[in-house]
Amino acid sequence: MADYRKTKYCVPFKNITINKMELLKKLKSDFPRLKNIYLKICENDKEYKMEFMKVYNYRCSYCGVSLDILNKRMFEIDHYIPKKADKFKNNNNANKIENLVLACQFCNRKKSDFLISDSEYSLLYPDNEEIKKIFYRDEKYYIKIENEYSQNETIKKFYEQLEMDGEVRRLDFLLISLLNFKKKYRNKLENLHILNELSDIIEKLKKKRNII
């Protein structure tokens, strides 16, 4: 099953839950009285954010954009179920590590307080395999909803609210593909002209995305 969030050269998401639990153990060891995990892993200048990003291979868990093209500050810690949800009114469970996922700033801001019901919780939860069954990349790299889920109202709203069909999603995927291709084959590309042309294309795409 293809994962729409990764190119053929990206390392797949793997053992996310296990790795999150390992990070949790480290945090509890370093801070025995720690109650709010979120406050520790959201700090840009601390090692724990990078540790959390590593769990997700430094990629947004919703769209797949990576540290290859965005800097660390453009990634945020999203509450999968928003803090405002009724289930969190009388407790601090919203900040448990299970409810925290890595998101690029664009996805996180667009998602905002999007509420997912308990019955559909697993469908869009990026730590498991289900989300890979819901979305796919077409031949032009656009993110689409699989036919099986195209009439699901929650999925449609999620797709629209996060602007998953946006041009930037396609551009990011192409840019990451080219960067990883160059990284993998740069020592095998005997023709320097081809390598330079590839570098020029990458720089033009970066400018188009306004990330330089």
Image (cartoon, rainbow, N blue to C red):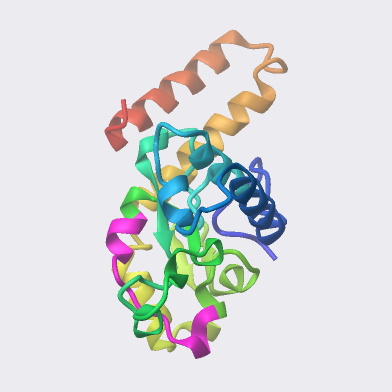
- Residue 92 visible in the shown view: yes
Residue lying furthest front: 33
- Residue 70 visible in the shown view: no
Q: Give above or below for 67 relative to 203.
A: below
Q: Position of residue 147 (x, y in %)?
A: 52, 82
Give left or right: position of 116 versus 133.
Answer: left
Q: Give above or below for 146 relative to 183.
A: below
- Magenta: predominant secondary structure element? helix
Which residue is painted at 30% across and 75% down in the image? 84
Q: Give the magenta part as a residue range.
A: 107-121
Q: Position of residue 26 (x, y in %)?
A: 65, 46
Indicate whether residue 109 is drawn in magenta.
Answer: yes
Which residue is painted at 50% across and 14% down in the image? 196
Q: Give above or below for 149 relative to 102.
A: below
Q: Give above or below for 112 relative to 13.
A: below
Give left or right: position of 134 versus 205.
Answer: right
Indicate whether residue 197 is drawn in magenta.
Answer: no
